[in-house]
Image (spheres, rainbow, N blue to C red):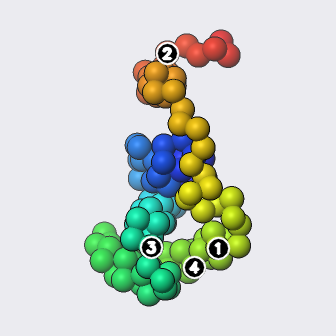
């Protein structure tokens, strides 16, 4: 989460493939924290409950709701106790857009990188 916030300005990555339950939960947590920082509510727990209640689970995955809630609360404990985790502290010097695009091209198009 920290790396995506540092590079792209959001916890939720620019591209995300949800191919597993773990990916789905991560996506939910990333979006939750992006929304939390955007809206800055006073009570994270109530905010998380309301946010998670809006999720449309796929059939057979409804049982994941309590796990997503527990994970969100655990991540929030780290978030509030680690000053380097919070959004404003992760906004470092923006990456050069040309470099960002080049790295993305290498990742998705299989172009050679500097290590090869």
> Secondary structure under badge 4?
helix
Residue at horizontal 59%, vertical 16%? 113
Give residue 105's position: percent from left, percent from top.
Answer: 44, 23
From what the image shows, is residue 4 above or below residue 103?
below
Front tag of 1 and 3? 3
Residue under label 2 = 111
Front tag of 3 and 4? 3
Front tag of 1 and 2? 1
Front tag of 2 and 3? 3
Residue at horizontal 39%, vertical 77%? 52
Residue under label 1 = 80
Q: Separation of disc 1 and disc 4 at Cα?
A: 10 Å
Q: Are marks 1 and 2 in contact (CB under 8 Å)?
A: no
Residue 113 visible, this angle:
yes
Mark closer to the chain start, 3 or 4: 3
From what the image shows, is residue 60 above or below residue 26?
below
Q: Residues within 10 Å of mark 2 (few under 14, many from 20)?
A: few
Q: Separation of disc 1 and disc 3 at Cα?
A: 13 Å
Mark closer to the chain start, 2 or 4: 4
The quarter of the picture where residue 112 lies is top right
Residue at horizontal 60%, vertical 43%? 92
Give residue 45's position: percent from left, percent from top.
Answer: 50, 85
In this view, the residue in front, 89 or 31, is: 89
Residue under label 4 = 73
> Secondary structure under badge 1?
helix
Q: Residues within 10 Å of mark 4 (few under 14, many from 20)?
A: some
Residue at horizontal 41%, vertical 43%? 14
Residue under label 3 = 40
Q: Separation of disc 1 and disc 2 at Cα?
A: 40 Å
Q: Are marks 1 and 4 in contact (CB under 8 Å)?
A: no
Residue 24 visible, this angle:
no
């Amino acid at each position: 989460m920290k790396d995506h916030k540092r590079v792209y300005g959001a916890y939720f990555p620019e591209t995300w493939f949800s191919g597993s339950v773990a990916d789905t939960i991560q996506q939910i947590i990333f979006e939750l924290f992006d929304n939390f920082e955007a809206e800055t509510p006073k009570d994270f727990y109530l905010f998380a409950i309301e946010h998670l209640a809006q999720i449309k689970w796929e059939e057979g995955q409804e049982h994941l709701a309590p796990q997503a809630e527990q994970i969100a609360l655990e991540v929030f404990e780290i978030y509030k106790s680690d000053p380097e985790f919070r959004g404003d502290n992760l906004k470092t010097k923006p990456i050069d857009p040309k470099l960002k695009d080049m790295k993305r091209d290498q990742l998705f198009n299989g172009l050679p990188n500097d290590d090869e």
